[in-house]
Structures are given as structure tokens and as C-alpha cells.
Amino acid sequence: MNYFQLFGIEASFDVDIQQLSSSYQTLQKSVHPDKFVHASEQDQRIAVQKSAHINDAYQTLKNPLLRAEYILIERGIDMPNEQHTFGDTSFLMHQMELREMLEDVKSSGDVDAALLEVQNVLSSEYLQLSQMMRAQIIENTAASNSAACDNLRKLKFYQKLNIEVDRLEDSLFDD
């Protein structure tokens, strides 16, 4: 059973997080270990496996990038691993520019302003790319699914870069 069916929701990129959360709680209650205290060892093991499956499904569907990846995989799109090179040389060049921008924060005369600028650029570009990927997933053609896959990989880069920004911010302001 796919994750959307498990939660009784429409297979769509746009998910009602409150409905998802409510379904999650209901499902988890149905397989809670307390309900299987007097059950056989096998039934207890099955309940634990079901609980783990429900948790994995919930974690996947509540996160937009994981949800997008799941939808694309369900559609039969071959997701390249993260080490697979991009054919988009302009994005590769932009990656280098963003990393340089992040490095320049350390030596900036106004670290706060430089950090804020990096955060604003990343946030704006992430949002734009995310909206584009959402539209491509909704379109659901071979070409749009392929483009969504490429944009998903780009969004993962932005996600990692945001983690680096957070680390940099922590290191700069820990004093």
C-alpha cells in the first residue's frame, strides 16, 4: 500500500498537513504496543513493523522534498543519486557563486548584513525553485517529471547550503 493510500489522502504534492497528522495519530494508536501486550510475539513484531512503516510514511509525506521524491519514484522516475553530475552547467556555476558568497561572509566588514543577504538569496531562490517543481509534479508529464527530478536535486543542494549557513552562523556568534 502506498503512503497516500495508507493515510487515506489523495496522491498529490499538496497535502493537508493537519489531516495527515490526524490520520497518523489514528494509525499509530491502532498499532500501539500497549494494544499488543497480551498478543503473541509474532503479533507484537508485526505491530512494531506496522508502526515503523506508518512513521516512515508520515515523515516522508510531511516533508515537501521527501514527498516530491516519493511521488516521482511512484511514477517510475529513476532518481539519480546525489553524486550524479548535473548537465546544467549554469546551475553548477551558480552553486560555486553561492558557496563563494557564503565564504565571503567570514571576512565581511558587516557579518550580520552579509549573512542576512546570503539567507535572503537562498530563501528566495529556494522558494522559486520549489514552486516550479510543485507545478511540474502537478503537470505530471514525462518531461515535467524529469524537470521536477532535476529541480528536486537542486533543492537538495539549497537545503544542504542552508545547513552550512546555520553552522556558519553558529560558529560566528558562539562567542
Image (spheres, helix red, strand yellow):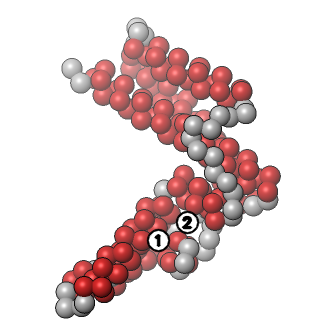
Q: As drawn, is 64 to the left or to the right of 47?
A: right
**Which residue is outermost to the front?**
42
Q: As drawn, is 122 to the left or to the right of 128?
A: left
Where residue 100 appears, as percent x and y from the top left, is 53, 17
Residue 132's mark? none
Q: As drawn, is 80 to the left or to the right of 173?
A: right
The type of residue carrying mark 2 is: Val
Which residue is denoted by mark 2 in the rendering?
15
**Residue at the spot 36% in from the left edge and 75% down from the top edge:** 49
Residue 32: tell me if it is visible. yes
Which residue is denoted by mark 1 in the rendering?
20
Where residue 106 appears, as percent x and y from the top left, is 39, 14
The type of residue carrying mark 1 is: Leu
Q: Nearer the viewer, residue 69 or 166?
A: 69
**Residue at the spot 54% in from the left edge and 32% down from the top edge:** 122
Against 68, residue 56 (above or below) is below
Q: Nearer the viewer, residue 36 or 131?
A: 36
Where residue 76 appears, as percent x and y from the top left, is 69, 62
Q: Using a 10 Å C-alpha cutoff, classify the residue at mark 2 as few (fewer than 14 neighbours), some (14 to 19) or many (20 or more).
A: some
Against 31, residue 108 (above or below) is above
Where residue 41 appears, as percent x and y from the top left, is 25, 85
The image quadrant that residue 28 belongs to is bottom left
